[in-house]
Image (cartoon, rainbow, N blue to C red):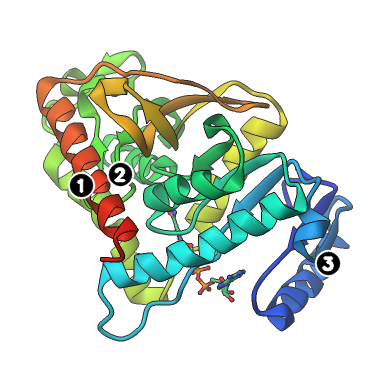
Amino acid sequence: MMLRALFEEIVLIDADDALARAEAADLSDANALARPARVWAGTYADAATARIAVVTAGAASRHQESRLALASRSAAIVVQCARSLADAGFDGILLVASNPVDLLAAVALRHAGLPAARVIGTGTLLDTSRLRQALAHRLDVAPGAIHGFVLGEHGDSEVAAFSSLRIGGQPLESFAPEADLPAVAEEVRAAAYRIIEGKGFTSFGIATAIVRICEAIVRDERAILPVSARLSGEFGIDDLHLSMPCILGAGGIERVLLPDLDEREKAALKRSAEILRDALARLDSGG
Ligand SMILES: NC(=O)c1ccc[n+]([C@@H]2O[C@H](COP(=O)([O-])OP(=O)(O)OC[C@H]3O[C@@H](n4cnc5c(N)ncnc54)[C@H](O)[C@@H]3O)[C@@H](O)[C@H]2O)c1
């Protein structure tokens, strides 16, 4: 974020004060060689007038802990962040990256005191980048030349919407009839696991996705990105956060779009929504 010179001020808040101070000091060193920005470790009061608050706080996974138990500890952390921002009078856009991101964006919305258009999850923007990258390698075109989306849950039930994907205006089945789409979808789905196996966490991909979303908002770009938005009836899905292509601008989610999907993709999206609804219910009931 600092290197893209998007903001004049960046406040870091972490439960671990010493960590926030150290990261801020390290970033400040880097800033001497970049465009000026003030980066410091602060408080929620310092963030009250921020344009965007990005929530990346989460619980670290413990040995043999279930996904739901981890989700429930991360949910408690996100609730605390959202409430603290609300108490400080924050009235900007809340971008949630903490996992499980669709559930935690829904949880944040309940506590942030903000309209739904201003509580966004990073969703499948990262998965969509991975899809473009995976296809770019196979088809020998630039990732940016591939127009398409991964939709639904950021997670195992995500849906690679191949039927609406276009390369130079051409559908995938005519551009590359031989492409092994299930293998591509699986590579995308497993990408995070492979990275975590090697380095323990993922960082550059998600950080760049966060920056891209912030950029679209700060510059009121009306860019169309797949992010986790509160749905209200799209594809029959209500009252849930999941990823659809959205027009992003100064007001956050300016509009949720409905891409053309084939019947199989529509069914997969509904399944993804059911999985999320069920997980949210279990999270609400404490497991
Ligand atoms: N959406 C995505 O695509 C994506 C990608 C990567 C990571 N993530 C998620 O981002 C989150 C963070 O990942 P990480 O690798 O940076 O983990 P991390 O453990 O390195 O960082 C989490 C930080 O949250 C802080 N924290 C804990 N409770 C807090 C609280 N109540 N208030 C403020 N800070 C608090 C911790 O001190 C820690 O520094 C995880 O939930 C992870 O799953 C999401």
User: Which comes before the other along the chain, label 3 or label 2?
Assistant: 3
Q: Is residue 8 visible?
A: yes
Tell me the distance, in whole angstroms, between the alpha carbons under discs 3 and 2: 36 Å
Per the rendering, the mark at residue 28 is 3
Instruction: Give me the residue at 31% from left, 65% from top.
Output: 286
Q: Are marks 2 and 1 in contact (CB under 8 Å)?
A: yes
Q: Give the mark toward the camera: 2 or 1.
A: 1
Instruction: Give me the residue at 38% from left, 50% from top.
Output: 103
Q: Give the mark toward the camera: 3 or 1.
A: 1
User: Which comes before the other along the chain, label 2 or label 1?
Assistant: 2
User: Which comes before the other along the chain, label 3 or label 1?
Assistant: 3
Q: Is 21 drawn above or below residue 156 in the view shown?
A: below
Q: Residue placed farthest to the front in the image?
A: 285
Instruction: Find numbered disc 2 in the image and state the secondary structure of the residue it sits on.
Output: loop
What amino acid is at disc 1? Ile
Tell me the distance, in whole angstroms, between the alpha carbons under discs 3 and 1: 42 Å
Q: Judge the density around disc 2: few (<14), some (14-19), many (≥20) Cα neighbours within 10 Å.
A: many
Instruction: Find numbered disc 1 in the image and state the secondary structure of the residue it sits on.
Output: helix
Say which of 139 and 233 sits in front: 233
Name the residue carrying label 1: 275
What amino acid is at disc 2? Glu
Answer with left or right where residue 226 lies relative to residue 155. right
Q: Residue placed farthest to the bottom in the image?
A: 63
Name the residue carrying label 2: 153
Give the percent coordinates (x, y) of residue 65: 28, 79
Q: Is residue 202 visible?
A: no
Give the percent coordinates (x, y) of residue 140: 33, 36
Image quadrant for the C terminus?
A: bottom left
Q: Give the mark toward the camera: 3 or 2.
A: 2
Answer with left or right where residue 213 lies relative to residue 244. right
Give the percent coordinates (x, y) of residue 222: 59, 21
What amino acid is at disc 3? Ser
